[in-house]
Image: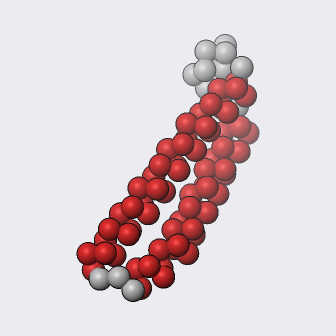
Amino acid sequence: MALRQQRSYPLDAIQREAQSLGGTLRAALERLVDQTAPLVAHADPAGRESILRSAVVDVRRTLRREFVGALRRLRRSAA
C-alpha cells in the first residue's frame, strides 16, 4: 500500500539509484579536474576562482538533473 502511494520504494531500486548517483558524481568530479586543471594552471588568482565557480555550477546542475531523474525512475519502479 505504501508503495502504491509512493511513500516507500523497493530497496533494490534505491540501491541502484544511489550507485548511479555516486557514479555520476564521481564522473563529474573527474571531468571537472580534467577540464579545469590546464586552465587553472595558467590563470591568475581571480581567473582561477571564476573558472572553478563556473565548473562547480555545472557539476551542481548535472547532479540536480540526475536527482530528478532518479526520483522519476524510483516512482516508476514503485508503480
Residue at the left extreme of this rendering: 46
Q: Say above or below: 53 vs 73.
A: below
Residue 77 x %, y %: 73, 28
Is residue 11 in view? no
Residue 44 x %, y %: 29, 83
Model colouring: secondary structure
Q: Say above or below: 56 vs 44.
A: above
Is residue 4 in view? yes
User: Could you tell me which residue is drawn at 31 percent across and 71 percent down?
Assistant: 49
User: Could you tell me which residue is drawn at 61 percent across and 26 percent down?
Assistant: 8
Could you say which quadrant of the image residue 48 lies in? bottom left
Q: Nearer the viewer, residue 11 or 74?
A: 74
Residue at the bottom extreme of this rendering: 42
Could you say which quadrant of the image residue 13 lies in? top right
User: Could you tell me which residue is drawn at 48 percent across and 57 percent down?
Assistant: 59
- Left/right of residue 75 with respect to residue 44 in the rendered view: right
Quadrant of image for the N terminus: top right
Residue 75 x %, y %: 65, 26
Q: Say above or below: 74 vs 40.
A: above
Quadrant of image for the C terminus: top right
User: Could you tell me which residue is drawn at 58 percent across and 44 percent down?
Assistant: 66
- Left/right of residue 6 with respect to residue 57 in the rendered view: right
Could you say which quadrant of the image residue 43 lies in? bottom left
Q: Number of labelled discs? A: 0
